[in-house]
Amino acid sequence: MAGFLTFENISKRFGDFTAVDSVTLGVEKGEIFSLLGPSGCGKTTLLRIAAGFERPCQGRVLLDGIDITHLPPDKRPVNTVFQNYALFPHLSVRENIGFGLKIAKRRATDIRSETDRMLELVDLVGLGDKMPARLSGGQKQRVALARALVNKPQVLLLDEPLAALDLKLRQRLLVELDRIHDEVGITFVYVTHDQGEAMSLSDRIAVMSKGRIEQVGAPAQIYEAPRSSFVAAFIGDTNFLEGRITAPIDERFSRAAIDGLGEIIVDMDRPVDPGGILHLSLRPEKILLSRDQPAAGAGENLLVGKVEDVIYFGPLSRYWVRAGVYKLCVEQQHREFLLDEAPPKWGDTVWLRWHAKDGYMLDDYHAEDESLLSLGDTTTKK
């Protein structure tokens, strides 16, 4: 798989543990590319291989067509921003940012002008003489980012750079990172276990599990069309429905019998013959909930159930509705002033409606992936 930064059949083992298992991946020039997955999935190891801090047991790394697999870190046009900032505590902000230029024996005037440019880029003008101990966490991370960018690397590697910050600050710095990327225009490779960070920042995402790539695509593609139960469960929340295809309706839709639930209409994302097993991912926000029975339109599914749990989140409420043997999660946005209406409550009978095209058929399903869900009781069938 060709790319500006390319991993070709990369494997890395630590003793008997395989951290990265035969990964082939291409990152395009100028994009923000995220490696996303749970702890221990191999994403940081892959980043460290790109940086030169680890050597692969197999495969090679190419940058702009040049093999850099065996180059030491200081010989690669690549810089890294770490989670713990790694600032020199005895150097000022300005000295930290200009450190790489000083090592490269650049002229003092060049160092000064480049450092000033970086201070402006990361919005730290006026703080150049401060010591790291006097900075907030967000300011320290901006210094680390400026120091990594000042040498104009071809690729910037970011290893969970916002993990140590509080939620509001992370959200602000995500916007800043996007702005900085737009200004400098270089390739960012961003490692995170936070789905929200990856979805909001990235041009493309590689979802990793157990050292392998599960799926690569744009954020909307990963979320709306997950290929496996792992991706569906790890990226947001979902309901898993299991059954068999019974009969085609037309070229696009078929009927399916869901065990313990009844018959529904499904969009045939991939060919499955009648009698074939179906695993469906249905996002909570795709389901419409109402007290009164609505009319089902063409291609729509309609179920009746009973509310078993409700959690109020402010802009939305999350409901768990018993329908057959399933406990389905439903999210309802509060589009109107909530105090003027009486929302469904525990024990109420409600109707659930969704269009067949809003469910997605999975290529690969494993029941243990349901443990990744954060749907309260986690499982959809009980």
Image (tube, rainbow, N blue to C red):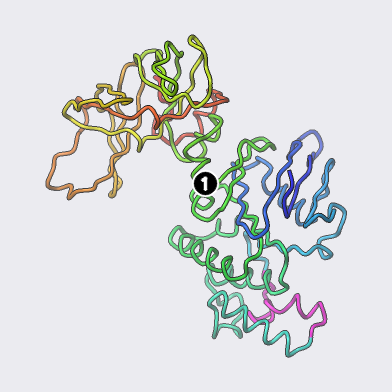
> Judging from the image, what secondary structure is the residue with disc 1 in?
helix
The vertical placement of 107 against 205, above or below, is below
Q: Which residue is drawn at 62% across and 57% down?
A: 31
Q: Assign the C terminus to one quadrant of the image.
A: top left
Q: Name the residue under label 1.
A: 219
Q: Does the magenta stretch include residue 98?
A: yes
Q: Is residue 194 left or right of residue 257?
A: right
Q: Which residue is drawn at 37% across and 13% down?
A: 260
Residue 331 coordinates in the image, percent (x, y): 32, 38
The vertical placement of 5 against 286, above or below, is below
Q: Is residue 194 magenta?
A: no
- Return the residue found at the far right: 70
- Return the residue found at the far bottom: 109
Residue interval drawn in magenta: 87-106
For label 1, the crowd category at 10 Å Cα-Cα, with few meaning under 14, some 14 to 19 and many 20 or more, is many
Which one is in front, 63 or 309? 63
Q: Assign the N terminus to one quadrant of the image.
A: top right
Residue type indicated by callout 1: Pro
The vertical placement of 138 against 42, above or below, is below
The vertical placement of 73 against 87, above or below, is above
Which one is in front, 153 or 220? 220
Residue 107 coordinates in the image, percent (x, y): 78, 87
Q: How many labels does the image show?
A: 1
